Image: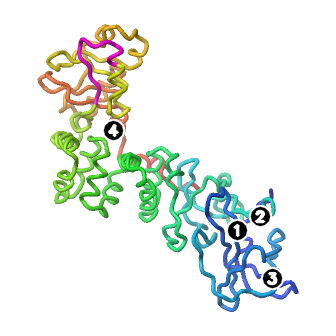
Amino acid sequence: MELLHLSTFLRRPMFDQAGERIGRVQDLVARMGDDPHPPIVGAVIRIENRDLFVPIRKIGGLAEGRVTFQGRRVDLRRFERRPGEILLAQDLLTRHLINLVRGRLISAHEIELAEVDGRWEVVGVDPARRNLFGRRRGGDIVDFASIEPFVAHVPSARLKIPYRKLARLHPAQIADLVEQASHEEGEEIIEAVKLDRELEADVFEELDTTHQLEFLEDRTDEEAARLLARMEPDNAADLISEIDQERRLPILENLPGPQRNKVRNLLAYNADTAGGLMSPDFVTVGAAATVGEALDAVRSSRAPSEALSTVFVLDDEGQPRGAVPVAALVRAPADSPVLTIARSPLAHVHPHWELHRVARKMSDFNLTVLPVVDEGHGAMIGVVTVDDLLEDLLPQGWRREFGMTAVEE
């Protein structure tokens, strides 16, 4: 399959069948839809300062690089974009596109076309820049089937980024896309994931604070509260603490009761301590529980998956007695008492401990979930998970520092 560059046709003359020049190619028009490679439906031709549309069936010579008009007469009505149509040069060339395979933004420095089974299609995007001699500088051409364009700047196209495509990516990848993109492009991504409220909340949790606040500015207090209600309580508390003072209480008051109480409790702690980082959701069983009952507790728990790798054992007074990794529960007979395989005494931290001290404890005991116990050792009040700890210990903007949010060339 021979690839042809879009730039080959731009500004090129169009000839009639007698060889007379009748106009100049301004752009090629493709139709977006379910086709992995959008078909070319025609060209925008400038004739005497008027932009006219010529359907692809009346265009010949593309493969040879000489554009010819093969109809009897040109429709003199001015070109008007129809729903679902994009102009390849105007809408795609040099703009940002989403590479759905890598979860990154790329810049379209060239659009690749090919004739497939008698139909001209958009088959690829070349993100590589060219030097003064026209040589490529960069990676491979990206298959257009794995590309999604932004169309917020083309309202007449009436297109949206399909949610089903973005949903293939991890929330952190989608957040990276938002952070790479312009505000308008980021809004388009957020709008697409709104169809799945849980995914929207997961993406918001992965955004840096600057972008979180940026996208909350345009939401009412009620809308902001609906979003925060789906976030983990510790992440919701962190975000509320960054919101302008006059909005904090109204948003907090709009949260559902259980979430509101958890967030309020977490706001009482310094953000740079175990108490400020901990999640109040974890799995516990009584000291008399069996292994089978402990596994049932994991299955029925609504705690975040990161916190489910360990079950904590409490005595009749609610004091922590030990911890059992889920892997140990799976290996043990279902009717065994859970205390027989519990790790005791319990490695733990207190809510006022600063994060490096928490990290040292987690590292010393090879833990991914670390319990937070109140100062009097009377109750377990939360857990710190290794992913949350890493997120706080890494420097602000670390993704940008290591080029993880750079647009790929």
In the image, what residue type sits under mark 4? Answer: Leu
Q: CA distance from mark 3 to mark 2?
A: 18 Å
Q: Can you identify the residue that label 2 sits on?
A: 119
- Of labels 3 and 1, earlier in sequence is 1
Q: CA distance from mark 4 to mark 3?
A: 67 Å
Q: CA distance from mark 4 to mark 1?
A: 50 Å
Q: Can you identify the residue that label 4 sits on?
A: 393
- Of labels 3 and 2, earlier in sequence is 3
Look at discs 4 and 2 and give the one toward the viewer.
2
Give the answer, above or below, for where 129 lies relative to 8.
above
- Residue 373, x across and y down, in percent: 19, 25
Look at discs 4 and 1 and give the one toward the viewer.
1
Q: Which mark is residue 40?
A: 1
Look at discs 3 and 1 and give the one toward the viewer.
3
- Of labels 4 and 3, earlier in sequence is 3
Q: Secondary structure at mark 2?
A: strand
Residue toward you, 44 or 39: 39
Residue 26 as seen in the image, left or right of residue 373:
right
- Residue 8, x across and y down, in percent: 74, 71
Q: CA distance from mark 4 to mark 2?
A: 54 Å
Which residues are the magenta region? Answer: 282-294
